[in-house]
Image (spheres, coloured by chain):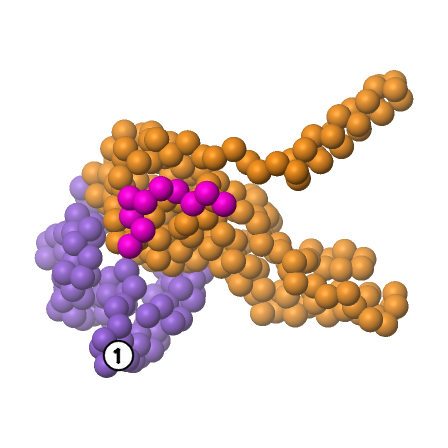
Amino acid sequence: MKPTRVALWAAVLALSFLGGCATKAPPYDYAAFMRAKPATLLVMPPVNESPEINATSGVWAHATLPLAEAGYYVLPVTLVDETFRQNGVSSANDAQEISPKKLREFFGADAAVYMKVKKYGTSYAVLASETRVEVEARIIDLRSGELLWQGVAVATSAEEQQQSQGGIVGLLVTAIVKQIVGTATDASYRYAGIANQRLLGASRYNGVLPGPRSPNYGKPPAVQ
Amino acid sequence: MWETFPKMQYDTLLRPGVTPIEQVGAMEAQAEKARAAGAALPPGFRAHLGMLKLSAGDVDQARQLWQAEKAAFPESAPYMDQLLKRLDAPVKKDNPA
């Protein structure tokens, strides 16, 4: 690639990045969601794309609370896990391959929540280790197979890290200590809770619509 | 009243095939606390406790709790009925349908 072209691309990327910061995402099209009116949600085992083996359990366990508080009945994930296992479905990938029709027949849910864990864990960088959880979700109507909603969310320890005192050595020590503590106490599990709340909690801009058990059910979506 | 229920679900999901019977005490204490406070138990709480009871061999308690889940959350009925049906039928693992 010629240097001029590289420079051009860099400029284009920089512009689109700045543009992304300045403008709000366009409002989500809730037409299908509003038509479908799901009441019961089946949260499927999340597919894990991170190297951390606990990611599926961490994200799955944190999905019920925000969706239930949003006004939905969420099928009990531990029993759903057991049901899949007893029927020979032992991986999240296999589970997510099952047809909506079959899921509907067995679980009786109106819609299923398909999640993917993009990042999960604590990484050690020279000056600051970071615990980061990135998740995405799609809600699919099990009666029609239609996509009702999708979204992404991130939670990271970097949000709450203070400027550390004590110069470069202090920073290095902080980074190492943070990684050890982060791993030992399963910090990722905590950040998975924050990420899921941001992803699946109701009344967020472009977020999940409130369900039938919510006092906000049927009200227009949040505008900011 | 969620308290540690998400964490209990997490601990259960982490160890597939192992049912954490030790959660029963804490869950019954939470249920008692919720009753005293007039607070609602979260969806899936009774169903999860029922699963633990079943692992401990208490079929009657499991049945009661799954029916209680249905009563508290009628939306759970199709799934709870599937589980109850299997509970009452002789176990045939090679013929799940």
Quadrant into which the N terminus of chain A falls: top right
The vertical placement of B58 against B73, above or below, is below
Give residue B89's quadrant in the image.
bottom left
Q: Which chain's residue wears label 1?
A: B
Q: At 46% across and 43% down in the image, what residue appears?
A: A223
Residue A39 seen in the figure: yes
The magenta region covers A215-224
| x and y, in percent, of residue A169 in the image | 87, 68
| x and y, in percent, of residue A130 in the image | 68, 58
Residue B48 seen in the figure: no
| x and y, in percent, of residue A127 in the image | 80, 59
In the figure, the purple chain has which letter? Answer: B
In the figure, the orange chain has which letter? Answer: A
Task: Return the residue at label 1.
Answer: B37
Q: At 49% across and 52% down in the image, what residue appears?
A: A198
Whether the magenta-drawn stretch holds residue A223 is answered as: yes
Name the amino acid type tagged 1: Ala
Residue situated in front as seen by the camera: A129 or A32: A32
- Classify residue A170 as left or right of residue A222: right
Q: At 83% across and 19% down in the image, what residue appears?
A: A5
Whether the magenta-drawn stretch holds residue A143 is answered as: no
- Magenta: main secondary structure equals loop
Count of numbered circles in the view: 1
